[in-house]
Amino acid sequence: MDHDYDTQSLAKAYELQGHHREALDIYVRMNRKSRGRNPEILAACNRLEKILEKKKGAAEAPRPGLREKRSLPALMEQWLALWLIRQRKTALDTLMLTRHQNRINHNAAYHRSIK
């Protein structure tokens, strides 16, 4: 990019569009040209450096569950616990279905007997 077009307006436009690195680069070059005498440019540099640090920290922060390493025994224990829960749920579903069918059969037999 031609650095002759480095202006505060261009840097602000980059910043508003989320291109913080490009905006900071322009502000740094402008700061060098002004020899650090423009407080507005210095403030913009500080602001953008903080934003980029936050972005860098957020990108490097481990997300829970994705990067944590677990031992095989711990994973097997968790899998077994989930498997047992599923087996119990299946057994309960079967029991509930059987009870429901028994009620239907009982009601049908009752209604046949009163006719």
Image: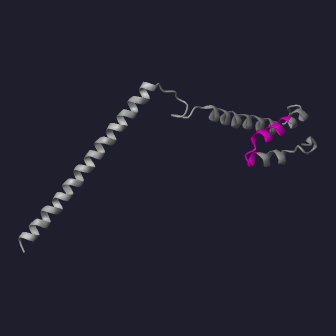
Which residue sits furthest left?
A: 114
In this view, 39 is above or below 14: above
* In this picture, residue 18 sits left or right of residue 41: left
Q: Position of residue 20 (x, y in %)?
A: 75, 41
Count of marks placed on residues: 0
Please give the name of the residue rendered at 83% of the width and 48% of the height, measured from the top-left corner. Answer: 9
* In this picture, residue 8 sits left or right of residue 2: left
Please give the name of the residue rendered at 88% of the width and 32% of the height, measured from the top-left corner. Answer: 32
Q: Position of residue 94 (x, y in %)?
A: 25, 50
Please give the name of the residue rendered at 16% of the width and 59% of the height, measured from the top-left corner. Answer: 103
> Where's the N terminus, which quadrant?
top right
Is 24 part of what is drawn in magenta?
Answer: yes
Q: Nearer the viewer, residue 19 or 77?
A: 77
Q: Which coloring applies here? A: one colour
Please give the name of the residue rendered at 15% of the width and 62% of the height, measured from the top-left corner. Answer: 105
Highlighted range, magenta: 15-28
* In this picture, residue 79 sits left or right of residue 67: left
Q: Nearer the viewer, residue 68 or 87?
A: 87
Main secondary structure along the magenta-highlighted residues:
helix
In this view, 80 is above or below 91: above
Is 68 part of what is drawn in magenta?
Answer: no
